[in-house]
Image (cartoon, helix red, strand yellow):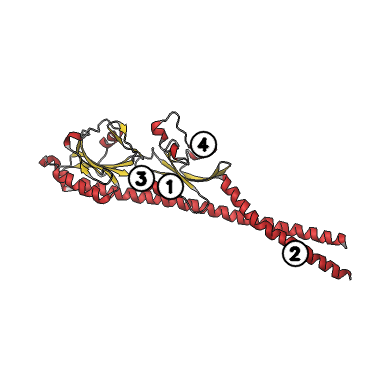
Amino acid sequence: MLKRFFILFFASTLIFSLFVFIRVGLLYSDAKKQIISESKHMIQTHKERFGLIVAHIKSEVAFLSKEKHTRAVFDSKNTDDLASQFLNYITNEKTYDQVRFLDINGKEIVRVNYNNGNPKIVSKDKLQNKANRDYFHDLINLKKDEFYISTLDLNIENGEVELPIKPTIRFATSVFDANNKKIGYIIVNYLADNFLNELKKPTPVLERKTLLLNKDGYYIIGLDKEKEWDFVFNKEAASNFASDFPVSWRELKDATSGYIENDEGVIEHLNICTNSNDCKNNLKLVVYLPQSKIIDMLVKFLTHAIPFYLIFLMFFGVVLNWYIYLNAL
């Protein structure tokens, strides 16, 4: 009777164990699919939000370039009306650090600074010439109704990175007079902190981390705050995604989007192009989940399954033993 009990118990346990193993595997697989789906949704939402920001600012810059006060600057030699308009504009929008009008030689004609919530018109003696800045060389080639959009970088004043740092994207377009002659450029400096802070918000489940990289893989948003923008101040010694995740970077660096899973973690990535006319300065948006979180998820499934498994074995052993005992009478 004992031999029969062990044979039946072993066979039944094997079948049930296989069922439990398959069930846990299916739950784990479904959970991973959910992770991938949620990561794709997260990254696409961030990209769409950024696209809406870009579209809005382009429409504002286009409006300013065609406004009568802008075109009248060189006719009347009076910048007061344009300065007042810029002041009202930057006060109401609250997301721009600077609004400027540059002549075709790169000299600031009108400039208004947001000044951390206390907007001011910059006096004429403090206006600068931006002809030596890299972005101005890109402005020179702009045709009518074309836009220049810089990559995301830190604002520079008088040749030095402004502190506290101001992550900035510059939007610009040409200004033409009534005779269709180019007379200058409207430039708006968008304060990117709000967008970056949205990316930094922690996710409620599994603690995914959103990273933002420049085209060379350096951190704009990183796993550690001290690594963010480190390449601006200490490029030779700055760590980047390639040094932290070498295997994943080899797959990611030349791809426009994709999903990566390896020992370094689970990664969903997508390129963001600030300027549709020139994508050489792509930003790389990355949603990262450490492999340890995946293992924790598997352990959680097993932790929930094992007690039920043991309870079943004890219950089944009692029932089987009772069944064999009754049949032996």
Q: Is residue 243 left or right of residue 136?
A: right
Q: Residue at x 54, y 55 (%)?
A: 34
Pick whichever of labels 2 and 3 is earlier in the sequence. 3
Residue 58 point in image, percent of width and height: 29, 47
Q: Nearer the viewer, residue 168 or 25?
A: 168
Question: Do the numbered discs 1 and 4 sit on residues whose CB atoms are within 8 Å?
Answer: no
Mark 2: secondary structure:
helix
Question: Do the numbered discs 2 and 3 sit on residues whose CB atoms are within 8 Å?
Answer: no
Mark 1: secondary structure:
helix
Residue 251 point in image, percent of width and height: 52, 39
Pick whichever of labels 1 and 4 is earlier in the sequence. 1
Q: Residue tagged by mark 4?
A: 244
Q: What is the CA distance from the residue labelled 3 to the residue labelled 4?
A: 25 Å
Between circles 3 and 4, the one closer to the viewer is: 3
Q: What is the CA distance from the residue labelled 2 to the residue labelled 1?
A: 50 Å
Q: What is the CA distance from the residue labelled 1 to the residue labelled 4?
A: 19 Å
Q: Nearer the viewer, residue 256 or 241?
A: 241
Q: Is residue 63 left or right of residue 281?
A: left
Q: Which amino acid type is shown beneath numbered disc 3?
A: Asp
Mark 4: secondary structure:
helix
